[in-house]
């Protein structure tokens, strides 16, 4: 069952394809984050859903309502879509009080005064703003302003909330706090969220599914664990989390990194489909590499930096380098020592991967 | 910068800055107040009240108020409407329209007034004559020698103050402020009414106050159109008194009293404007940039475009054409027809008549000299204000910006008081007194441009040079000066261009051989040499527009 | 290679005391980091070292030379140091090569020598090929590399770095901190680095000086010293996320705030009745059962490499973290609402009240 449905969406700016053939369904109460490098089309997609951009192909529906349709040449303006939306730069109106900011969408809908009061109070309560109802927005901090924006979006009790990098203008301390506040409110009220962000830990903490985009094309849609542990391609792998890559040669049933042997028991999974190819790329997360006393792939510690709770190693393996991160409670070698490494969670990619570059 | 303090460099710069500002700005302004309040060496408020209670003086005060309020209201409405039209709607050719609406900024308004006089003076104006003689109207359809006439003409030239401020605010405004209203369910006209206009209200108000400030101190238009019907405002009354009595004490005193009133009014406006800017301005400037959604004018698109074109035609093309055509007439009053045209007038004023030829060279010379001197003085003073942490720099800043709020006629009067022999130097009736007044008047422009440029030069850029081994002088030479050069160039032209068309100051200071372009046009008109006045105005327009265009092309200066 | 010695340094601005009687010695060839919250006076100290400000009292010696105090006042251009600023301070009207060559030009170095050293410095920071570019054509990271090359080109014996990585994005910051460290070790110069970011400080310093907002040096030591053996709660808190728990002693046992749960580890040798116990998220080990402190998971967030937990136990809320890989095993994965046991692999005890710590570190 889905509420919001994007079907084969295309968008062009001049000759440049900003979004190509995008499909996405968002279930009621689900939170989907769109993640990708800047210019990948994630914001454009959100703005097409909001109605600020028209579409050059496909159809957008919410429930049984068509919002935008190329085939039917139909376009519902944003003010008729009944979505809540929160913007990066807060976009609260400085000439209106906190109360009036939140009441604005209700006044536009000509609700009776007592109903407006009731709904604004409710939105204020959800966002912990009750005491500040009569303040001016400019008297509030960035976090406070973003709460007003959130309350304003909640006031009409939307089924879908669109969030455009809502936390990136806040300082790190507030960012984390707000992240969980949004999640809590969503759980209580049960709306769906479509969310644009460039912060992957935010996307992981907040969303049920993550959509990774690159140059207007969807690379993967999946749960946070899916995109982290089973990335669809090398681009997704390197975009989500830290990554380290080793070039591996396959000769006579053996694996080699430069001249060094890579024992089969040093990888959790041998790349059956790549063995015949001759060469491939082993992709690992620095935290998924383990040190072993005996066996494994042999390397030399070139750098060891304590970053506090995490210790960061740079290991020379033949002519290549590998990055390893361990918590400080785990034992590890010192600079200059040789060590063995084992790859606990690994992904294999062809040497030339169309998703890179 | 501790290391080099012992060489005394900062003291030299500081002393120089103080000297320039005191001599050119502080002394003349203080002399005005002194002469207004002190009679024969003692404070005499009663005498001041007496001057103010004379019928002519308080009438001038009231006229100033009426004219300024009228122009402010109409100018604000016109400016806001056009600004909204070119930034928030799908009006065709918006970009070109925006440029055209700014053209009145570079045209001298007294030349416009001259043109409107030729078109709409009750008896001899071409339009009125057309209606009376050809269409058989009983009387003139519009009399330009009235309050409405003056307000209309001033509005044409002053509305860009609001236009430019509101355009800027609307263009820089975060589009998500409007988008969030849309997603809240509001349509575009509701958003304009409830969100957009209230958010730019401080910019509208600030532009409106600028119009008021300007109009209050405005000389040219009122002098051209008001004197005939006996409408005086403060600057024209000051001029009238000084001229009639050839510098007698009574006249000067009336002048200083009126000036004091004018300065107080101007200070009040500036104070209000600062309050609006500091307290009322909302943080509405965007980081991310999407183009704001345009309001579709639909059926109104072409009619509104036609309206804009008509407005521009009526306010820019018509008066300008009139100037050139009348300037080519054999005699004023003849119908405008090919057989009545001649180039002799232009030839005469350019090559034969000393009065006009001198005026052109005087204006160019004065403009260049004032611009150069003020530019260099401006660099020194703004360096002291922006970069040196010395006590008393607040006073320097105040002195430097003072001429912004002191109207031109007041500066001229102050310069007369200071430099006509009373204190040992008499340069009255020479070109030097005009130069001194120009320097005082335009110092604020130079400070603004140079301070803006200097503020871009972050301290760490200089410190990086010091850490690289450069002495303070080397850092100035290699880092500071190259980086403020654009500001200096901007300052030069911000002074040179307006100086070319200056009237208010020079009309009070000119002598027999020291007319400027503005003075020449004004006196020719007063003497009834309408055709020569128009021809001179035509030449002035060509010089001014050419200079503007060349400067903008070559140096790409943003106004 | 040169040492820096600061004795009894004091500086006030407008009646506000920023630095008071500060002593510090930085050894020749050492990478020293001043770590502290904003407004703690670390930048003021840097400006005194560079010579942009004059101390009210005290002396600064660079190598054997007295540069400030005791009548000495060597201007910045004669202190023979290199400096990199937070806002890059790359001269916008000069090309990359001209920026880097400027210190040599001022020193009247011969043209061919100047070209050679400019090229080498640009190469050292990885900008070879971009010599002719103007700063406006460079990214923030590249501009900061230009500033670094400019500071290195005259081969200064002392390099001052004032939060140079602050304006860069996270990835670039991570990359460049290692590069700066490698460059420092390769060239063997003395580096004084100012930052408020403890991860950068830990990554690039031989020794760290932790300053508090009153301008006092709380602790000076190796990264391991300040991280594992903090002298007080301020230092502990400033070096990373920390849980602080107000504990109460009853006889030989220490009780958690709920008054019932007992500290499971070895009792600290503290005489008072009240103390604060601190631990970091990774110090907490979660288990299904056992004799650890009993708790309930309030929130579990998957953040990629690590799992982040909020756990209620002993009357307080703990922040805990584990390697995500362990959480792949259902037996090791805790969901919201589940009960768990907490064991503490690391802990610090302070005889200060929690309120003082929380208030003092803001």
Image (cartoon, helix red, strand yellow):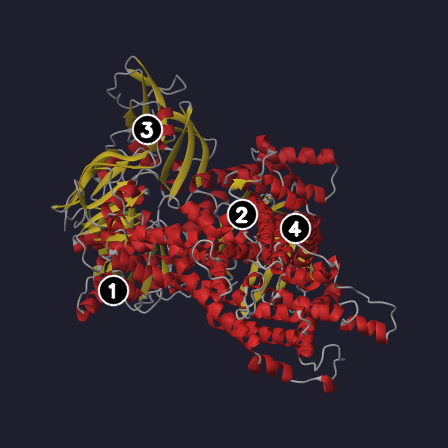
Which of the marked residues, 3 or 1, is nearer the chain's N terminus?
1
Element under label 1? helix
The image's mark for residue B35 is 2
Q: Name the residue under label 3.
A: C278
Q: Which of A91 and B418 is in front in this view?
A: B418
In this rendering, the label closer to the viewer, 3 or 2: 2
Q: Measure how far apart labels 3 and 4 are at the Cα level.
A: 55 Å
Query: Which residue, given by chain and number where applicable, does mark 4 sit on?
Result: B197
Circle 1 chain = C
The answer to whether residue C265 is above or below residue A29 is above
Snapshot quadrant of residue C293: top left
Residue at mark 3 shares a chain with residue at mark 4: no
The residue that mark 1 highlights is C101
- A349 and B352: which one is in front? B352
Q: Position of residue B312 (x, y in %)?
A: 68, 68
Distance of label 4 from label 2 (alpha carbons): 46 Å
Nearer the viewer's eye, disc 1 or disc 2? 2
**Local secondary structure at mark 4:** helix
User: Count of labels shown?
Assistant: 4
């Amino acid at each position: 069952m889905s509420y919001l449905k994007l079907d084969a969406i295309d968008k062009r700016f001049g000759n440049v394809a900003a979004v190509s053939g995008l499909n996405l369904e968002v279930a009621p109460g689900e939170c989907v984050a769109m993640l990708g490098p800047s210019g990948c089309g994630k914001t454009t997609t959100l703005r097409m859903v909001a109605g600020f951009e028209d579409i050059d192909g496909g159809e957008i529906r919410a429930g049984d309502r068509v919002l935008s349709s190329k085939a039917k040449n139909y376009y519902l303006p944003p003010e008729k879509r009944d979505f809540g939306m929160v913007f990066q730069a807060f976009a609260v109106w400085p000439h209106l009080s906190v109360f009036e900011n939140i009441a604005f969408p209700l006044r536009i809908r000509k609700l009776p005064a007592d109903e407006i009061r009731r709904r604004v109070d409710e939105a204020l309560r959800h966002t912990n703003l009750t005491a500040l109802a009569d303040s001016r927005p400019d008297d509030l901090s960035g976090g406070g302003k973003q709460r007003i924006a959130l309350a304003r979006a909640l006031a009409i009790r939307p089924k879908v909330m669109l969030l455009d990098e809502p936390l990136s203008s806040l300082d790190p301390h507030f960012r984390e706090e707000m992240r969980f506040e949004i999640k809590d409110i969503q759980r209580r009220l049960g709306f769906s969220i479509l969310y644009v962000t460039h912060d992957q830990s935010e996307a992981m903490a907040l969303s049920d599914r993550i959509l990774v985009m690159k140059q207007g094309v969807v690379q993967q849609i999946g749960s946070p664990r899916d995109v982290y542990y089973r990335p669809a391609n090398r681009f997704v792998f390197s975009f989500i989390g830290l990554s380290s890559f080793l070039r591996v040669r396959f000769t006579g049933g053996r694996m080699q990194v430069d001249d060094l042997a890579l024992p089969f028991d040093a990888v959790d999974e041998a790349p059956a489909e790549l063995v015949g190819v001759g060469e491939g790329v082993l992709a690992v997360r620095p935290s998924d590499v383990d040190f072993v006393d005996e066996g494994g792939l042999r390397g030399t510690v070139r750098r060891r930096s304590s970053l506090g709770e995490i210790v960061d190693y740079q290991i020379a393996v033949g002519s290549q380098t590998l990055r390893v991160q361990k918590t400080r409670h785990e034992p590890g070698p010192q600079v200059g020592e040789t060590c063995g490494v084992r790859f606990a969670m690994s992904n294999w990619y062809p040497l030339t991967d169309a998703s890179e570059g | 910068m501790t290391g080099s303090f012992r060489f005394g460099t900062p003291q030299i710069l500081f002393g120089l800055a103080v000297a320039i500002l005191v001599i050119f700005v502080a002394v003349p302004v203080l002399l005005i107040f002194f002469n207004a309040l002190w009679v024969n060496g003692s404070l005499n408020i009663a005498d001041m009240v007496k001057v103010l209670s004379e019928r002519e003086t308080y009438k001038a005060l009231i006229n100033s108020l009426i004219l300024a309020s009228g122009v402010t209201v109409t100018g604000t409405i016109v400016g806001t409407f056009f600004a909204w039209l070119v930034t928030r709607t799908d009006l065709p050719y918006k970009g070109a329209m925006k440029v055209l609406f700014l053209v009145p900024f570079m045209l001298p308004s007294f030349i416009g007034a001259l043109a409107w006089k030729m078109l709409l003076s009750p008896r001899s104006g071409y339009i009125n004559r057309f209606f009376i003689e050809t269409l058989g109207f009983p009387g003139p359809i519009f009399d330009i020698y009235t309050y409405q006439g003056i307000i209309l003409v001033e509005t044409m030239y002053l509305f860009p103050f609001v236009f430019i401020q509101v355009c800027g605010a609307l263009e820089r405004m975060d589009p998500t402020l409007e988008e969030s209203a849309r997603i809240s369910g509001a349509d575009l006209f509701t958003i304009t009414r409830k969100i957009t206009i209230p958010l730019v209200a401080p910019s509208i108000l600030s532009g409106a106050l600028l119009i008021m400030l300007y109009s209050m101190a405005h000389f040219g238009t009122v002098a051209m159109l008001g004197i005939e019907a006996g409408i005086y405002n403060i600057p024209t009354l000051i001029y009238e008194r000084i001229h009639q009595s050839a510098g007698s004490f009574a006249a000067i005193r009336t002048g200083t009293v009126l000036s004091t009133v004018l300065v107080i009014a101007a200070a009040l406006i500036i104070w209000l404007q600062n309050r609006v800017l500091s307290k009322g301005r909302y943080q509405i400037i965007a980081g991310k940039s999407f183009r704001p959604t345009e309001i579709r004018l639909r059926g109104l698109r072409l009619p509104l475009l036609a309206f804009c074109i008509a407005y521009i035609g009526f306010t820019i093309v018509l008066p300008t054409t009139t100037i050139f055509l009348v300037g080519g007439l054999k005699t004023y009053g003849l119908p405008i027809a090919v057989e009545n045209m001649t180039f002799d007038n232009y030839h005469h004023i350019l090559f034969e008549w000393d009065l006009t030829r001198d005026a052109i060279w005087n204006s160019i010379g004065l403009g260049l000299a004032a611009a150069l001197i003020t530019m260099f003085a401006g660099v020194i003073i703004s360096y002291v204000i922006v970069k040196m942490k010395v006590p008393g720099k607040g006073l320097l800043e105040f002195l430097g910006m003072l001429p912004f709020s002191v109207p031109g006629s007041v500066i001229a009067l102050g310069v007369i008081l200071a430099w006509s022999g009373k204190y040992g130097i008499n340069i009255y009736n020479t070109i030097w007194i005009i130069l001194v007044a120009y320097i005082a008047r335009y110092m604020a422009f130079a400070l603004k441009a140079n301070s803006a440029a200097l503020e871009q030069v972050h301290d760490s850029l200089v410190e990086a040079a010091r850490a690289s081994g450069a002495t303070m002088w080397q850092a100035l030479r290699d880092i500071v000066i190259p980086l403020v050069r654009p500001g200096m160039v901007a300052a030069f032209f911000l002074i040179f261009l307006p100086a070319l068309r200056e009237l208010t100051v020079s009309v009070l200071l000119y002598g027999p051989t020291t007319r400027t372009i503005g003075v020449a046009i004004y006196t020719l008109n007063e003497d009834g040499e309408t055709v020569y006045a128009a021809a001179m105005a035509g030449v002035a327009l060509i010089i001014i527009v050419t200079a503007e265009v060349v400067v903008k092309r070559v140096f790409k200066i943003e106004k | 290679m040169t040492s820096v010695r600061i004795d009894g340094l004091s500086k006030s601005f407008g009646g506000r005391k920023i630095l008071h009687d500060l002593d510090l010695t930085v050894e020749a060839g050492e990478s020293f980091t001043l770590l502290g919250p904003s407004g703690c006076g670390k930048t003021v100290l840097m400006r005194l070292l560079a010579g942009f400000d004059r101390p009210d009292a005290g002396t600064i010696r660079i190598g054997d030379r007295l540069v400030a105090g005791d009548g000495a006042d060597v201007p910045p251009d004669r202190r023979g140091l290199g400096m990199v600023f937070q806002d890059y301070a790359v001269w916008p009207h000069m090309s990359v090569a001209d920026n880097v060559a400027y210190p040599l030009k001022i020193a009247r170095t011969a043209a061919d020598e100047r070209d050679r050293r400019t090229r080498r410095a640009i190469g050292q920071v990885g900008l070879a090929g971009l010599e002719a570019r103007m700063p406006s054509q460079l990214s923030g990271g590249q501009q900061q590399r230009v500033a670094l090359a400019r500071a290195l080109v005259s081969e200064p014996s002392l390099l001052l770095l004032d939060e140079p990585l602050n304006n860069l994005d996270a990835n670039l910051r991570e990359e460049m901190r290692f590069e700066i460290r490698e460059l420092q070790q390769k060239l063997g110069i003395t580096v004084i680095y100012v930052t408020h970011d403890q991860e950068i400080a830990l990554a690039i310093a031989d020794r760290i000086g932790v300053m508090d907002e009153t301008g006092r040096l709380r602790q000076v030591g190796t990264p391991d010293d300040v991280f594992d053996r903090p002298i007080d709660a301020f230092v502990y808190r400033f070096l990373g996320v920390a849980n602080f728990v107000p504990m109460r002693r009853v006889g030989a046992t220490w009780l958690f705030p709920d008054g019932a749960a007992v500290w499971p580890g070895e009792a600290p040798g503290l005489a008072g009745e009240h103390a604060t116990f601190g631990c970091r998220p990774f110090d907490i080990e979660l288990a299904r059962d056992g004799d650890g402190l009993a708790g309930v998971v309030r929130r579990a967030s998957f953040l990629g490499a690590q799992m982040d937990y909020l756990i209620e136990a002993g009357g307080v809320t703990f922040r805990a973290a584990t390697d995500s890989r362990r959480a792949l095993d259902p037996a090791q994965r805790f969901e919201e609402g589940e009960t768990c046991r907490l064991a503490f692999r690391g802990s610090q005890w302070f005889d200060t009240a929690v309120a003082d710590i929380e208030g003092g570190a803001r």
